Amino acid sequence: MFPVVDEEGNEISCAPRSVCHDGRSMLLHPVVHLHLLNKKGELFLQKRAMTKDLLPGKWDTSVGGHVSPGERAEEALKREAEEELGLKNFKFRLIKKYIWKSSLEREFVYSFTGTSEEVPVIDPGEIDDGRFWPLEEIKRNLGKGIFTPNFEKEFEEEIC
């Protein structure tokens, strides 16, 4: 079950994942994104697993996941960072909140940036690959179908 939120991010109900991602209901549900930078200023990206229902095999934000019912965005971020990258200690700050709409869903996105002394260790059940990218390499590959559209939007508006 996903929480359903209003346009300010307030939880108003819950709905099954299948309904939130069906392309018809367009129920607004909250997600978290983390842009993890290392000391060199490189950005860690994850390659979405081929088993994902949305955008399989595309490179995406360092961490991304759904907020659970009753969970705060910061709690979801910590949970997802540990699940996907094994991060237990990292510093982060909220960059912005916005609504993202695709052909299948609407998300209320909490976008964070952060750093960690820990080396990310990907969970192969969640992610197919992951690595730090120099920002110039990302810039050269924008618009080539390598990254998720949502990541490209965030990168251009928040990271560059």
Image (cartoon, helix red, strand yellow):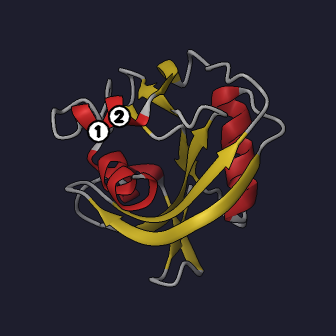
Residue ID at (56%, 18%):
125
Three-letter amino acid code of the residue under disc 2 = Glu
The numbered dot on residue 136 is 2
Residue 34: x, y in percent?
A: 58, 48
Residue 54: x, y in percent?
A: 32, 39
Residue 128: x, y in percent?
A: 46, 17
Q: Looking at the image, is 70 positioned above or below residue 82? A: below
Residue ID at (68%, 50%):
77
Please tell me which residue lies in front, 90 or 82: 90
Residue 55 is drawn in which quadrant?
top left
The numbered dot on residue 107 is none
Q: What is the count of numbered marks?
A: 2
- Crowd around label 2: few <14 · some 14–19 · many ≥20 (10 Å): few
Residue ID at (72%, 67%):
70
In the image, taking residue 24 as reference, residue 1 lies left or right, namely right
Kindly report the distance in space between the C-alpha atoms of the residues bearing marks 2 and 1.
5 Å
Residue ID at (43%, 71%):
98
Q: Quadrant of the N terminus?
A: bottom right
In the image, taking residue 111 as reference, residue 48 lies left or right, namely left
Residue 74: x, y in percent?
A: 72, 60
In the image, taking residue 11 as reference, residue 45 lies left or right, namely left
Q: Looking at the image, is 50 positioned above or below residue 32? A: above
Please say if the residues under marks 2 and 1 sit with CB atoms less than 8 Å apart.
yes
User: Furthest residue to the left?
Assistant: 144
Please tell me which residue lies in front, 149 or 117: 117
- Secondary structure beneath label 2: helix
The numbered dot on residue 139 is 1
- Crowd around label 1: few <14 · some 14–19 · many ≥20 (10 Å): few
